[in-house]
Structure formats: structure tokens, C-alpha cells
Image: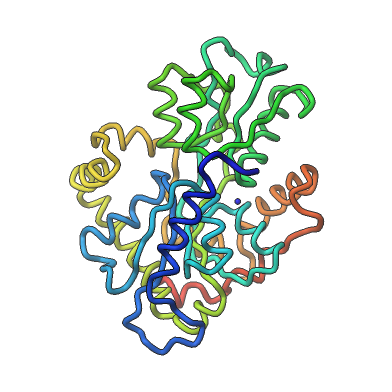
Amino acid sequence: MATMEGRGFYRGALIALLLALPLLSSCSKEPATPLRIASSPWPGYEPLYLAQQIGYLPESKANIFELPSSDITLEAFRNRSADMATLTLDEAMDLLQGGVRLRIVMVLDTSNGADAVMATPQVKTLADLKGKRIGILNIPLGVYMLSRTLDAAKLTRADVEVLPSAENKHEEMYRQGKADAFITFDPFKTRLADLGAHVIFDSSRIPNEIFDLMLVHEDVYQNRREDVCNVARQWFRTQAYMKQSPDEAAASIGKRLGVSATEYTAMVSGIKTPTLQDNLELIGGVSPSILAPAKRLNEVMLREGQTKAFVDVKPALDAELAVCISD
């Protein structure tokens, strides 16, 4: 997974840009046509850009578009302006509920502290959130994190004022004093910290509940399976490169993000990146382990009115995933 100031402009301009590119029809027979991959700012997605930079995933194979926020990425995938997209598990479930036929190609990362509630200095504890204004992401993850935060604080939705807003608006809201706390993630989390905000709750307290995924439309998966699987293989190849050359990788990624290698390393300290074998256990085989956290997430989404019925993610998984992503 409310409107926001400027969102219409960004959506119109950027989605129009995507649509202006050579479109891939579901029956395309031109293997040279690059896959269109939509993404948004998040340190866990950076290996994708690094793969392109070091030549593992050349532009002849994939065009990667970094959109301003995750809700725009969600819409780009929903309206088929993108063939593939980096989205969260809750967003995948939102798409499935809406009738979008998709596949989960791989789990890119799990959040273990990188998603957080950043508060102003006046809000010192979770209990202090009572009566306060909380800026939350314009995606299902925002509501999910809000629900888990309020559970931990022993508060209800009625105890706080919720302000739906895109993550790229939080710095401005902080400066203008428009909210007392923000549900966010890096790089926005670090930027808020630089302004004086501090962490009062993060995903390390709810481990194995927030997953970032690579999604692909079902027809693209069927018609361009080798190209799609190549994206996954190059992701894992890039992971190997990052382990072999950590300083060079961190420097390259830091340069793209406009931060130092040390700052980038700090950003990803709250992110776990599943290995190929981890992926096979999470989303492959006959008993994928992601089904249990998906059920917990579904229960929260039902409670919060984000879905009207149980969403089964199993049809979006491939029991033969090993054939796709293994060399």
C-alpha cells in the first residue's frame, strides 16, 4: 500500500512519463523490450539500482523508475504503468483484494527497526501520544504501523488525531509544527532525526511482520518469465557483490542517495535482507513461511477496515520458485 498536496501533479507527470515509454503488451514477443520496474525511496531497494550501476542489470533488460513515494508506486503498478514494482506485503494484499493478478517474485527485505514512529522532543514516551497528531503513510503499512503502535501504547484510534500524508511531506510538516509524531522509514527517518525527532517505537518490536517484495503482473510473469527471473537472479548476484566488496558497494549507494557510506550503513542497520535460501523458505515450496505473518497482517487490515474479507496470498506464490531464481 487520502490525498496529499501536490500528489496529483506528481502522479500525473510521472505516470504520464511511464506511459510515454514503449509499452509492453501482455503478448509482447520482443525480448529486447526492457521491463519497467517502479520503485520508491527506501534503503532496502538500493541493491536494485546498484545492480544496474555495476552492469548486472543493464537498461536493455530493465528500466527502473524511482517515484517520489510508495503510494504512487502502488498506483503505477495497479494501472499497469509498470510491469514490476517494489512494494510491501500489505500493498500486495491490497492489490490482490482489488482483483490485480500478480506474483511475488522475491522478498527483498524485512524491517527490523527501519520503520519507526519519530516524535518531537515534547513526546517522550508512547503514552505521551494521547491527544497528539500523528502523520501516517498514505499506504496500508501506515495504518498497520499505527495499529501496532497504539497497541503498544495501550491507546485507541480515538485517542489520537491521524493525518494521512506521504512520507516525502513529513520533513515539511515537522518544520511547520503540523504533527507531533510521524510513522515513517529511511531515508525520511534519518532526515527527521536530523531535525530533532527521536524514535519512540519501531519495527524491531514487531519482527518478521513487515516485508518488502518484488511484484510482477501475472501475465508478464507467464509471458516473460526468463526476463523476470533474471531480475531476481541479478538481485542475488548483487547481494554477493555487496558482501565481497562492502566498502565499494556502500560508497556507490551512498553517492546515489547523497549520503556518506557510513550514513548508508546506519540506514540499513534496521533491515534484514533474506538470502536466496531464505526466499525459497519464505515464498517457495508447498508450505511458504510468509503465510503466517500474512495472516496476522490480514487480521489487522480487517480490524482497521482496510479489507472486507480474508486475502489469500498463496495464489501469488510459485511453488517452483527455485527453478526461477536459482542459477
Could you say which is closer to the camera, residue 106 or residue 147?
147
Where residue 279 sits: x, y (%)? 49, 61
Residue at 70% across / 25% down in the picture? 161
- Residue drawn where x is 43% and y is 57% of the image: 14
Who's the residue at 67% across and 54% down the image? 294
Total label count? 0
Residue 63 position, x and y percent, is: 34, 66
The relative height of residue 210 versus residue 240 in the rendered view (above or below) is: above
Q: Locate residue 166 relative to residue 50 in the image: left or right.
A: right
Image position of 100 (left or right of 85): right
- Counting from the top left corner in percent of width and height, residue 302 is at 79, 48
Q: Is residue 32 left or right of residue 144?
A: left
Reply above or below: 304 against 153.
below
* Residue at position x 53%, y 46% in the image: 7
**Quarter of the image with the C terminus in it:** bottom left
Name the one closer to the observer, 79 or 118: 79
- Please, is residue 200 above or below residue 1 in the view? above
* Residue 263 image point, x, y percent: 30, 32
Q: Residue furthest top?
A: 122
Q: Nearer the viewer, residue 4 or 201?
A: 4
Colour scheme of this structure image?
rainbow
